[in-house]
Image (cartoon, rainbow, N blue to C red):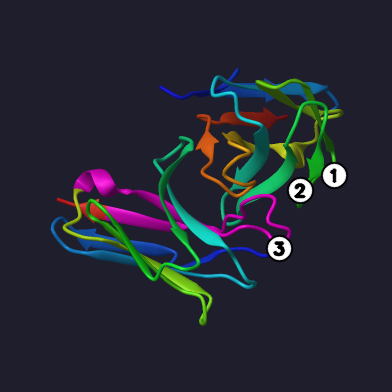
Amino acid sequence: DVKVTQSSRYLVKRTGEKVFLECVQDMDHENMFWYRQDPGLGLRLIYFSYDVKMKEKGDIPEGYSVSREKKERFSLILESASTNQTSMYLCASSLSGSGNTGELFFGEGSRLTVL
Amino acid sequence: SQQGEEDPQALSIQEGENATMNCSYKTSINNLQWYRQNSGRGLVHLILIRSNEREKHSGRLRVTLDTSKKSSSLLITASRAADTASYFCAPPNQAGTALIFGKGTTLSVSS
């Protein structure tokens, strides 16, 4: 069964901390994505990557960075967490052959609270 | 950026009834997808419809696409309590590099 695994379902961090959200997929997918989901705002794209060491900014990249050192792993980094980054973070992956707009496979989400 | 906009925002029906959700988008697309999200979980892909298709079926799901109106609809027939979830349409962004999600339609099916 295909799987996208997000390392932490729930995290509580303090303002100013550096936060790492990890995502691993076992489907050999080229494309990986990070979204955040907030009530009333839906899902918003933060960053995506279509190959190892490649990254593209999404709609709301400010305050975030990403790392893709291996094909199966895509990390989202909050360099200095702020309260407005309290959110649900969703990782997803897709095959390159189906185009960058092919079917997405999502992880279960990481709910981050920044105090 | 382009975004799928779902309508209505919320829908409450009884088991056995049909549920229809609509989606509008802004630019030309090559396909459009629908996803489902159970409360507090990740999204699950339901169906993809290509721009040259007008209608597509999958089990109790029927999706239509009208590219001239830049709109799509998702029909769930004979709804069940287990269909209670949020539903999102997801057109590609303008560059065709990622999917853009709206706020979704929250469907509640009561038994």
Q: Residue furthest bottom?
A: B68
* Quadrant of the frame with the N terminus of chain B: bottom right
Q: Secondary structure at mark 2?
A: loop
Tell me how far mark 2 sits from mark 3, CA to CA: 12 Å
The three-letter code of the residue at mark 3 reads Gln
Residue picked out by circle 1: A62
Residue A16 pos. (x, y %): 86, 27
Relative to B102, residue A96 above or below: above
Residue A80, placed above or below residue A43: above
Q: Residue at x 73, y 29 (%)?
A: A115
Letter of the chain that mark 2 sits on in the rendering: A
Q: Secondary structure at mark 3?
A: loop
The boundaries of the magenta stretch are B81-108
Foreground of the two, B14 or A25 = A25
Residue on which disc 2 sits: A58
Residue B2 image label: none
The kind of residue on which mark 2 rests is Gly
Q: Which residue is mark 3?
A: B94
Residue A28 in the figure: left or right of residue A71: left
Give the foreground label among 2 and 3: 3
The Cα atoms of the two marked residues, 2 and 1, are separated by: 10 Å
Q: Nearer the viewer, residue A103 or B80?
A: A103
Q: Residue under mark 1: which chain is it in?
A: A
- Residue A13: tell me if it is visible: no
SS of the residue under disc 1: loop
